[in-house]
Image (tube, helix red, strand yellow):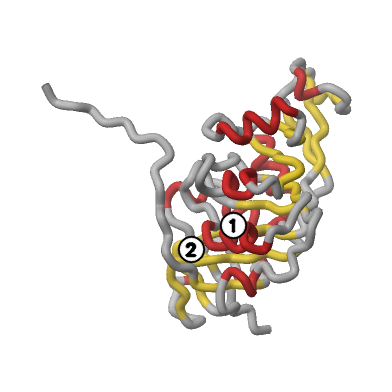
Amino acid sequence: MNKICTGAEEAIRDIPDGAVLMLGGFGLCGIPENCISALVKKRVTGLTCISNNAGVDDFGIGLMLMQQQVKKMISSYVGENAEFERQLLSGELEVELIPQGTLATRCMAAGYGMPAIFTPAGVGTEVATGKETRRFNGKDYLLEYAFEADFAIVKAWKGDTMGNLIYKDTARNFNPLMAMAGKITIAEVEELVPAGELDPNMIHTPGIYVHRIFQGKDYEKRIEQRTVLSKK
């Protein structure tokens, strides 16, 4: 199976309007920048995006929000995007806020083939509204369903032609979980090497989960918030 694509535009070629997408990364770290840019250029609409965050106004998923390509955001943290806030308050954007651990575990459940999980996170809060609660050993848990994503789009530090991936530092927070969970997983990497060149002990995502892979370019690697301590 040839998994190699020439670039982002080929890799996302068949993502249709109305698709459910998982997008890896944590804040602005480890996000699939090239694929997001290709989606902006393709102008697909009605997307449901599952992501830890919604990017910022001029970067990441924020670029798709600016073009109103996103119908629904399923996220944990959305505090850095003014356009996101505007669309939410105006009713243009549907939003589902999820505790971060629950978001990660629902991704993991999808990758493991589990239909649902029980979690104590959110019990007794608005998160529990309309959800089944069950008691185990004297403690209440919420029933949460595994995600069903048409595509998972992830970014790795290195990958090989078989789709094996290695992530670096903070990029390991959501990318590995999402790579397991999509019906079709697309990976962009900073460096693409021939099969056999990666140390098997260092691989985080086995190639069996990855359907398409390409070497990205022009990564910005922005810092979401910079705090500087001045010396007096």
Placement of the N terminus among the 4 image quadrants: bottom right
Q: Which quadrant would the C terminus be assigned to in this image?
A: top left
- Residue 47, percent from left and from top: 75, 50
Q: Nearer the viewer, residue 231 or 218?
A: 218
Residue 170 visible at all: yes
Q: Residue at x 49, y 52 (%)?
A: 30
Would you call the spot at circle 2 few (<14 residues within 10 Å), some (14-19), or many (20 or more)?
Answer: many
Q: Residue 149: image x %, image y %?
A: 76, 54
Under mark 1, the amino acid is Ile
Q: Residue furthest left?
A: 232
Local crowd size for mark 1, using a 10 Å CA cut-off: few (<14), some (14–19), many (≥20): many
Give the residue at mark 2. Answer: 166
Residue in the image at 78% along x and 50% along y:
46
Q: For mark 1, what is the residue? A: 36
Residue type pointed to by label 2? Ile
Q: Position of residue 112 (x, y in %)?
A: 74, 54
